[in-house]
Each structure stands twice: as structure tokens, then as C-alpha cells.
Image (cartoon, rainbow, N blue to C red):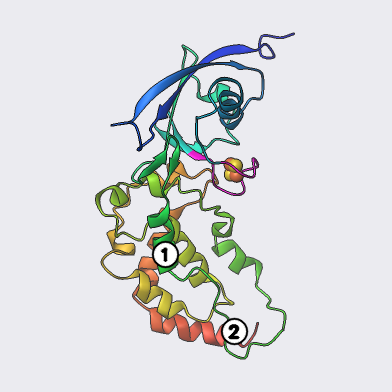
């Protein structure tokens, strides 16, 4: 057996907080055997199953699809289910796991994401097809797909939202997650309401509130670029009516 394959011991510090009984959050330490390939989520599941069943965290898919397991690990937001535990251990084989920031803690690593989803709904994240479009096939060019810059792969994990210093200062800010979705819809040639969408994000809590700090890019586990999307929306707000006219012409060819 190579050194890599050997099980090592890690000290996992988890932020605990039960608002019903605790006055403030505190760290609790668990000793966890770490075989090769164990993820952070595996370690949390081990702790819950073998040491303390009251440790509370969210997870569902275990495949970086649902976005529910995002947590703050050693100060950086990431998905617990696709991050090998060994890659985040310090030289002393320790790791500190906390809930995502700027949202009320329900219990331990579970936060109340109501504000996150309220901001998301503000941008009308659903597709609005042209009236009377009928059941026909829409054709989108490879260039138009490329322009989306993989924004459609966002899984709404909240890692960007909880790393954004503007969100920290102003909970009314629409946020990088919702603005990335707005970008996706605005650039989607099948959508018929780009001018309305651009109007929605051009207010005081929209794209011009972003301070271009880039934290959202660093935090995104899907390597997406909300900052660039916000920059594109900023430019398009200047010519939103002309942009919608161009969209109408384009849709005649879809
Ligand atoms: S459990 Fe679904 S993204 Fe991690």
C-alpha cells in the first residue's frame, strides 16, 4: 500500500449552533479517519453516522448537481460533495467547516436561503418565449451558445452570493447568482423580454451596485464568471430597446 492509499487521521472542526439552546456559534472538533477519496461530505456523513447524529448539514445529489451542500471550508466557499477532504487539510491535518455567510443559521451548517431565492425571483429566471411562438423547434447558433459562457450550468449553490462583499453590506442587492441568471435569459435568443429584464437589473440594487471585487469568480465551484456577466448586462442596459428590436428580428429566423 502506498502512502497515498493509507488512511490518515484528520481533525474536523465544525461550527455548531442551535438557536434554540446556544447563545452563539462555537467550533466542535471531531477525529475522522480519512481513506483515499473521502470527500468533505463523506466526512460529515461519517461524523453524523458514527459520532454525533445531531450534526446538521444539507446534501442531496452527491454529484455537484443540486447545489445544496455548499459550505465554507477554511474560509473559502465550496461544494462539500465534490471536494476531497485531503485537498483542504492543513499541514496539521485539520479543517474548519462553517455555514455560508450572510444568511441566518437554522442549525449548524444549514442556513436560511429565503433572501437568496427572493432575489433570484426578482429577475424572472424563467424563459419568456415570443407570443404565438407555437410548438416549433428553436435553433440557436454555436456562437450564441458560446456567448452564454456556460451560465446555464449554474447550480444555484449560493457560493458566490455568500462570498460577495456587496451582499454583506446590502441585502437588497440582487446578487451575483440572480444577475448571472438574468444574463443567461437576456442573451438567450429564444427569450422575448430582454428589455424588461435589463430594466429590472438596472436599478440601484442591480448591476451598477457590483463593486467588481471578483469574489464570486473565486467561489464558484463550476468556474463560472458572474462578474463578466454583470459587466455585459451593464453595457446592454445602455441600449436595451435597440437590443430588444434586434432580438425580435433574430427570432424571425429561429
Ligand atoms: S450534494 Fe448536490 S451539489 Fe453537493
Residue at 25% across / 66% down in the picture? 204
Residue closer to the observer: 214 or 70? 70
Please state the horizontal and vertical placement of residue 31, each as a whole percent of the image. 52, 14
Please state the horizontal and vertical placement of residue 251, each as a whole percent of the image. 59, 84
Q: Identify the magenta region.
A: 59-70
Q: Which residue is mark 1?
A: 232
Quadrant for residue 108, please give it.
top left
Labels in figure, total: 2
Residue at 61% across / 44% down in the picture? 60
Lateral position of residue 236 relative to residue 187, left or right: left
The N terminus, quarter of image? top right
Q: Main secondary structure of the magenta part?
A: loop
Which secondary structure lies at badge 1?
helix
Q: Which residue is mark 2?
A: 251
Which secondary structure lies at badge 2?
helix
Residue closer to the observer: 47 or 198? 47
Amino acid at each position: 500500500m502506498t502512502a497515498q492509499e493509507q488512511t490518515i487521521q484528520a481533525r474536523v472542526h465544525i461550527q455548531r449552533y442551535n438557536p434554540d439552546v446556544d447563545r452563539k456559534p462555537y467550533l466542535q472538533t471531531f477525529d475522522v479517519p480519512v481513506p483515499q477519496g473521502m470527500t468533505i461530505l463523506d466526512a460529515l456523513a461519517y461524523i453524523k453516522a458514527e459520532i454525533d447524529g445531531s450534526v446538521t448539514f444539507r446534501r442531496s445529489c452527491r454529484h455537484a448537481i443540486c447545489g445544496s451542500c455548499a459550505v465554507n471550508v477554511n474560509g473559502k466557499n465550496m461544494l462539500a460533495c465534490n471536494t476531497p477532504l485531503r485537498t483542504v487539510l492543513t499541514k496539521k491535518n485539520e479543517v474548519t467547516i462553517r455555514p455560508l455567510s450572510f444568511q441566518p443559521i437554522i442549525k449548524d451548517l444549514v442556513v436560511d436561503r429565503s433572501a437568496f431565492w427572493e432575489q433570484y425571483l426578482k429577475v424572472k429566471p424563467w424563459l419568456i418565449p415570443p407570443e404565438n411562438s407555437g410548438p416549433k423547434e428553436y435553433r440557436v447558433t454555436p456562437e450564441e451558445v458560446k456567448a452564454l459562457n456556460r451560465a446555464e450550468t449554474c447550480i444555484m449553490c449560493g457560493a458566490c452570493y455568500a462570498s460577495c462583499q456587496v451582499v454583506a453590506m446590502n441585502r437588497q442587492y440582487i446578487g451575483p447568482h440572480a444577475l448571472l441568471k438574468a444574463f443567461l435569459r437576456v442573451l438567450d435568443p429564444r427569450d422575448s423580454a430582454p428589455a424588461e429584464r435589463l430594466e429590472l437589473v438596472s436599478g440601484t440594487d442591480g448591476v451598477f451596485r457590483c463593486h467588481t471585487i471578483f469574489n464570486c469568480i473565486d467561489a464558484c465551484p463550476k468556474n463560472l464568471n458572474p462578474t463578466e456577466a454583470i459587466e455585459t448586462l451593464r453595457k446592454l442596459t445602455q441600449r436595451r430597446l435597440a437590443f430588444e428590436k434586434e432580438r425580435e428580428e433574430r427570432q424571425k429566423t429561429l
